[in-house]
Structures are given as C-alpha cells and as structure tokens.
Amino acid sequence: MVEFGFYDVLKLIGSLGFFMYGMKIMSEGIQKAAGNRLRQILSTMTQNRVLGVLTGFLVTSLVQSSSATTVMTVSFVNAGLLSLVESAGVMMGANVGTTITGWLVSIFGFKVSIAKIALPIIAFGMPMMFVKSGRTKFWGEFLVGFALLFLGLDFLKHSVPDLKSSPEVLSFLAGFADMGILSAMMFIGIGTLLTIAVQSSSAAMALTIVMCHNGWIPFEIAAPMILGENIGTTITAELASIVGNVHAKRSARIHSMFNIVGVTWMLFAYTYFLDGINYLMVDYMGMVSPFEDAASVPIALSFFHTAFNLTNVFIMIWFVPLLVRIAERTVSSKGEEDEQFHLEFIGGYIMGAAELSLLEAKKEVKKFGELTLKMHNQTIKVFEERNPKKARKLISKIAKYEEITDRLEVEIASFLQKVSQGELSERSSIMVRSMISVIGDLERIGDIYYQLSKSLERKLDDEIWFTPDQRNNLVELIGKLGDAFDFMIENIEISADDLNINKAVDIENEIDRLRNRLRKDHLKSIGDSDYNIESGMIYTNMFSSFERIGDHIINVSEALAEK
C-alpha cells in the first residue's frame, strides 16, 4: 500500500504552486514584452463574433491564462466597451486558447525533458532581467518563467504518489469508471472542484495530466475531469462579475452557459471522441493506445481538450444570440442604476494582466472625455433655452454629470494606481502618468460647466438677458470650444506617436485670442448708458470660464502626447 503522509501533501501543493508561479512569471513577461501589440489585438474585438473568437484565442495563447482573458472581457462589458454578443466570441476563443497549455505540458513536460535544460535557460534569462532595455528584460522574465514552469512540472511528476504498485486503489477507481454517464458526471464534478480549489484551469489540467502519466487515473476517467475543469474556470469570471453591473453579470452567465452546455452534450458523445482519438493515435500516428499505456494519455488528453473546445465553438457560435437572450432573461436588471456603465464596479477587481488593463483604462478615459463633451452640449442647450422649466431640467442633468465626473476621477485614478503596482514597461508607466493627468483636467472641466450652469440658472431666475452682441460673441466662442473638444476626443483614441499636438495648440490660441478680444470689447462697453451690470458679470464669467475650459483641453492633449 502506498503511504502518502502530510509531508507528501505539502510537497504536492508546493510543486503545484511552483508550476503556477512559473506560469505567472512567464505570462507577465510576455505581456510586458508584447504589451502594445496585445492592446492592438484587443482593440479589434468589437468587429464581429468570429473575429472575437480569434482575438480570444490569440490573447489567451499569449498570456497563457483564460481567466485573465475572460475577466478582462467581463470588465469590458461592464464598462460598456463590448456588447454581450461581442464578448461571447472572445470567451469562446479563450476556451480554445487555453488548450495550448495542455499541449505545452504534454509535449515539453513529458516528450521533451525541458527540466534538464531549465537551469541553463535560467542562466541565459536571468542576466537579461537586469538589462535596462525594457523589452530584453521582459523576454528574460519570460524565459525564467518558462524554465520555472517546467521545473515545477518536474517536481509535480515526482510528488504525485506512485499508485502502479497499489492495484487495490486502481481497482477502486476502476469501479467508479464503469457506471456510464454517472461516472462521467462524478469525475466532471471532481474536475470542477479541483479547478475551483486551485483557481487555475491550467494548473488543474497539468495536475490531471501528471496523474494520468503516473498511472493514477486512466484515460476514460481523466477526460471527464478535463470537462469539469472547463466548468470550473467559469467561476473566476462569475466572481469578477459579482461587483459588476447587470451587463457584466450577463457576460459571465454567457461564458458559464457556453461551457456547461458544451459539457452536457459531450457527456453523451465523449466515448465516441475517446475512441476516435485512440483510432487517430494508433492507426495514423503509430502511437500506443492511451487506453493501454499511461505515457500516451497526456497527448490523448490534449487531443480531447482541443477537439472538445473547437467542436463546441463551431456549434455554439451559431447560438450566440440565443445565449444572449437567455442571459438577459435569467439575469434581470435592478433598474436604471444597474443599467448604467460606471467604472465603480471594475475598481473592485484587478486582473493579473496589468499591461492589458491599460487598454480598458484608456477607453474609460475616452468615455470620461465624452462625458465632458455632453456637459458642453447641455450647457449650450441651457444657454439657448427660453423655457425656464426645460432649462432647469437640463441644469439638473449637468449637476448629475458633475457628480459622475467626481466619481470617475477617483475610480479611474484608483484603478490606475492598482495597475501600476504590477510590473509595467517604461512606455506603459508613462501612459499611466499621462492618464492620471488627463482625468484631473477632465474633472476640472466638469466643475467649470457645473458652475456655469448655476450662473445660467441665476440668469433665468432673475430674468437677466444678454445683448445680441454678447450672445453672438458667446456663440462664436462656443463653436471654437466645440472644435477643441472634438480634437481632444480624437487624441484620446489614438496613440501618442500619431497625435498632432500642433493642431490642438492652434485651436487653443484661437480661443485665447477670441477671449482677449471679448474682454477688451466688454471693458469698452462698461461706460455705455445702456450697460447692464448683472448681465455683464454673467457674460464675463462665461467667456472667462470657456477660456479656462480651453486651457484644460490643451492640457489633456499635451498629457496624451506625453509632453
């Protein structure tokens, strides 16, 4: 009988931790080395569901974490940056992308002895980590993480107990393998619980493959466990959506339904899949049957995992609209507040992919900029509105927007501060500082528009009217400010390298010149007999406030240009 004491349990847990740590270092290294490219890939997610599948596959293959991809997708939906239909494609692709881990472990972990050359890889990668050049340093981290991952896998192989000499245990397991669909359901449950326990489907899969290779569990038991691990990985997205809005919860629900429905139909077909894989490996690849040789099971499981996820995507991609409708019916909205897209829900969770989080942050900053433009447009409507009742409704909306700008500044700054706690490339660190500067200026723009709305409210209450010249002058200044806003929003969307700061400066100079002319003309008019002091004070406040808004707008463009 094999003895497996407390110390052996600790060795097994430590080996699993070693494997997961290596995966974390490798994932973070590749993210930082290819950060800008990853953000470019992610920016294409919104085009169609097929492209979304490809995006999810590529990102997950690179970062080696389907959890990071799915949590990121949930947070994008939460922020209103992706629709439910678009997010479904990305999550489907993430499921296919995570199969790469199984192939890495099966081929390099068992067919090639990477562990023997792991220390030379570390010897090569470690000096690279101390190079000042960012990309060289990050590739060094990737190499060290890669070596640590397979060292951890080697420890894991030796930590799992050898049950080959314990036929009574194997016969015990075999007894549970002969109950048909009930056996499959039981081992699906075990795989689900294993993934929830270690919070990583990749780690759970590696452990399953090692147990098969060591002869602990046979192929027909391991396959349902792999299916269970597909269900277990949905827990991460569900947890991330708990603090999210209704759209985030629906996105996580779609991910869960996709995996659960896939596992359900596979319950009735998995024996045919296993026979097909056995036929492929024996008759076409000249390998030993995985039903007879434990050493063949890792490759067979990788085939099974890939075949299942690809087939599931090909089937379920046609039912995405149906999944969306079911999610909308099963996850009901709590009202208007739950329907709104705010960053407050994202701020409670930061995924491990710090570099990828910057894309989300940048899009939130763009939304912030668009909100200040809405305040600009609402202020124009108040300025033009002659009906006091309608004007007051517009003013109350501006006040609501101002409260949101205050909250957004705090929330985005908190989000960026948490992101910056992870290791970032030098360019990404500059982006963080730039965005923090931008949100400060956007919040101050919101404050100025709120103050302007209160001045216009007082103008209505006291029935104060502008002269035709004053109205025309303000309309001209508002037009220039609108041009500045449009160019600011455009600058937020593009990269610093493509930004044309000269045009922004030209618009700001035009605003300054116009403000100076209005102030000079106004000072001349003070001595006129028909001069109205009250309207003159509000008029002066308005063109001065508009000029200050122009100053903050040019500050935004300069920060985006990383000046």
Image: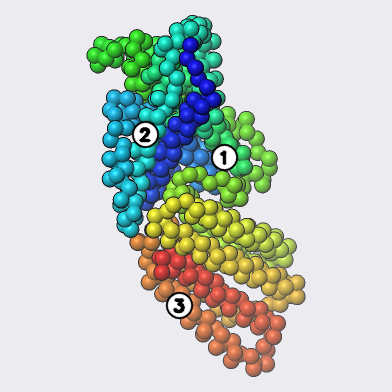
In-image side of 394 versus 189 (left or right): right
Q: Secondary structure at mark 3?
A: helix
| 22, above or below 556, in the image | above
For the point 40% across and 29% down, the residue is 155
Quick check: 111 above or below 215? below
Percent across and percent down for residue 363 are 48, 53
Residue at 69% of width from left, 61% of height from top? 396
Type of the residue with mark 3: Glu
In three-dimensional space, the C-alpha distance between marks 2 and 1, rounded to whole angstroms, equals 31 Å
> Which quadrant does the C terminus fall into?
bottom left
The residue depicted at 53 percent of the width and 44 percent of the height is 75
In x, y percent, where is residue 24? 43, 41
Q: How are the residues colored? A: rainbow
Pair 3/2: label in front: 2
Return the x and y of residue 332 as percentages of the image width and height. 65, 35
Q: Secondary structure at mark 2?
A: helix
Camera-near label (2 vs 1) is 2
Q: Mark 2 sits on what residue?
A: 151
Mark 1, other Cα within 10 Å: few <14 / some 14–19 / many ≥20: many
Q: Which residue is mark 3?
A: 510
